[in-house]
Amino acid sequence: MGRRTEQEQVVLVTGAAAGIGAAIAELAVACGHRVMLTDIDEVAVVSRALSLGDRAAACVLDIRSSAGWARAFEAAEAAFGRVDVLVNNAGITHTGVARDLREQQHRDIVEVNLLGTITGVCTALERMTAQGHGHIINVCSMTAFLPLPGYATYCASKYGLRAFHHSVAIEERDGPLDFTIIHPPSTRTSMLEQEMADPSSAIAFAEKPYAPERIARAVVDAIAAKPVEVVFPPLGGRVQRIAGVFPRLMRLVLPIAEAKGLRRRERLMPHPGTGR
């Protein structure tokens, strides 16, 4: 059975209760796809799916659980008959410099961002190969290229995810599956709100954050176009990708970016007594 080329796809999205994942689900439905929304927050993800109508369904998924992944695929297959596209979007961070984070916080980041996504990819590989088609889209991060202060373990998880993604894509190059990895920059989600509360995360505000809808557009466009890799912004992201290769250069540039981020963060923070 060859790769599917028809417009309508069945898409399974993780972390779909809010933020980028919710925006992906909403746009995918609007573009004519059918979507299985998954999230660790069952109440929120079910509510989100109900708001999108009969082309959407939902189930709870802790991406760290291999049994949970099996149930998510089974739920999508029961609702829509198959899964054509997996969008691995779920992720977390704990803000703070490496020495200040607890051991469990380091583990949380790696277990969700890296090991959880690996578990999902491996589940999809088996099922999609058996059905003869499929597209795996991993939503990663521009920190996959950039060693950033305040994000040591988060960056490590994203560096690892990018390496895993491309290694698997090469391993499967003669098979029936497509692979895309997308690297958002700082995005206006609850994660950014968490970062705003911590001065050690000032680098996140060095550039103007993107709206989740812009990332969602890139993901949904990728369902049809199947690019190998997408960076944000298109030109600046390529420059950042090159700069990240040179640690000495990063040590020179990052203090400037951090100072810029601190100034932008101060402007964005609510002022006491004003509510703005």
Image: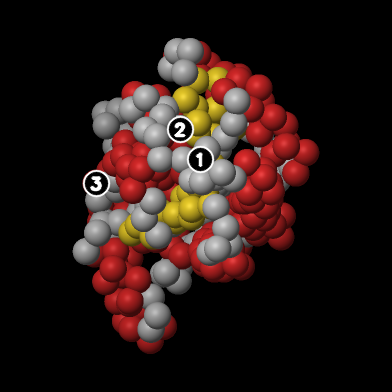
Numbered badge on residue 97: none
Looking at the image, what colour scheme do you see? secondary structure
Q: Residues within 10 Å of mark 2 (few under 14, many from 20)?
A: many
The residue carrying mark 2 is 9
Q: Residue placed at 67% from the left, 45% from the top?
A: 130
Task: Please state which of residues 232 and 266 is positioned toward the viewer in this rendering.
Answer: 232
* Amino acid marked by disc 1: Val
At 42% from the left and 69% from the top, the residue drawn is 145
Of all residues shown, which one is farthest toward the right? 67
Secondary structure under the numbered disc 3 in the rendered image: helix
Quick one: label 3 or label 2, which is nearer the N terminus? 2
Q: For mark 1, what is the residue?
A: 85
Pointer 3 local density, CA inside 10 Å: few below 14, some 14–19, many at least 20: few
Q: Nearer the viewer, residue 102 or 191?
A: 191
Helix, strand or loop under label 1: strand
Q: CA distance from mark 1 to mark 3?
A: 40 Å
Disc 3: which residue: 267
Measuring 48% from the left and 13% from the top, which residue is drawn there?
A: 54
Position of 273 with respect to 61 (left or right) is left
Query: What amino acid is labelled 2 in the image?
Result: Gln
Q: Nearer the viewer, mark 3 or mark 2?
A: 2
Relative to 107, does residue 218 appear above or below in the rendering? Answer: above
Q: How many marks?
A: 3
Q: Rounded to the nearest whole Å, what is the CA distance between mark 1 and mark 2?
A: 7 Å
Cβ–Cβ under 8 Å for marks 3 and 2: no
Q: Quadrant of the N terminus?
A: top right
Q: Position of residue 152 (x, y in %)?
A: 53, 66
